[in-house]
Amino acid sequence: MRVLTQREPGLDIPGITAAQFLAGGIPLIPLVLFAGGSTEWSRPALDAQLAFLVAGGQVLVYVGFNAALGRWPSTRVYAWTFLVPGVAVIVDAVLGKLPGFGATIGAVIAILGVAIVNLPSAEGRAPLSERR
């Protein structure tokens, strides 16, 4: 995505993200039709849960992720994905299920790693061949 946005600054990031979802989702349709299982579609909370997952967990995250790849180095953008388990631990703590020692240490290490990668000095200097 970074190379594409550098080559084509007017690139349609939401459109490309939608195409990626379609390319990944369409082949799964036969699985949905033939795998079995059931969902209680009449549950009132299901609509809110689906709306949150689609809008927040998919559209917002992936469009933002692809847009970030167009603006920043991929090492900086991908580092943020390491925060997902840490956020899950924090959400559990807020809900009353305090994490154990190992989970706490893991979350702290992940947060520190992302902070270090995002320091301006972490990008380093350009190679000698690019400085001329």
Image (cartoon, grey):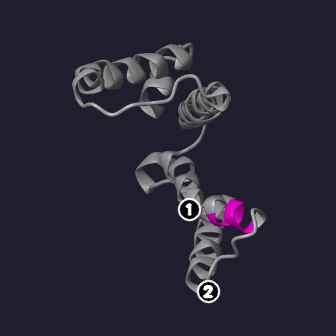
Q: Amino acid at mark 2?
A: Phe
Residue at x 41% of width, y 23% of height = 21
Q: Nearer the viewer, residue 75 or 24?
A: 24
Residue at x 43% of width, y 24% of height = 4
Residue 56: quadrant of the picture: top right
Residue 62 rendering spot, x and y as whole percentages: 54, 32
Horizontally, residue 108 falls left or right of residue 82, namely right
Q: Secondary structure at mark 1?
A: helix
- Look at the numbered discs 1 and 2 and tell me whether their residues touch, using CB distance below 8 Å: no
Q: Secondary structure at mark 2?
A: helix
84 is higher (above) or lower (below) than 50:
below
Q: Which residues are magenta?
A: 89-93
Q: Is residue 67 magenta?
A: no
Few, some or many residues within 10 Å of mark 2 (<14, 14–19, 20+):
few
Residue 106 rendering spot, x and y as whole percentages: 56, 76
Q: Is residue 92 magenta?
A: yes
Secondary structure mostly seen in the magenta stretch: helix
Horizontally, residue 129 falls left or right of residue 30, namely right
Label 1 to label 2, Cα distance in Å? 14 Å
Residue lying farthest to the bottom in this orientation: 101
Residue at x 23% of width, y 20% of height = 30
Residue 103: quadrant of the picture: bottom right
> Which residue was labeled with disc 2?
101
Horizontally, residue 26 falls left or right of residue 131, namely left
> Which residue was labeled with disc 1?
85
Residue 18 rendering spot, x and y as whole percentages: 47, 17
The disc, 1 or 2, on the residue closer to the chain's N-terminal end is 1
Q: Amino acid at mark 1?
A: Pro
Q: Nearer the viewer, residue 116 or 31?
A: 31
Q: Nearer the viewer, residue 111 or 127?
A: 111
Q: Nearer the viewer, residue 98 or 41?
A: 41
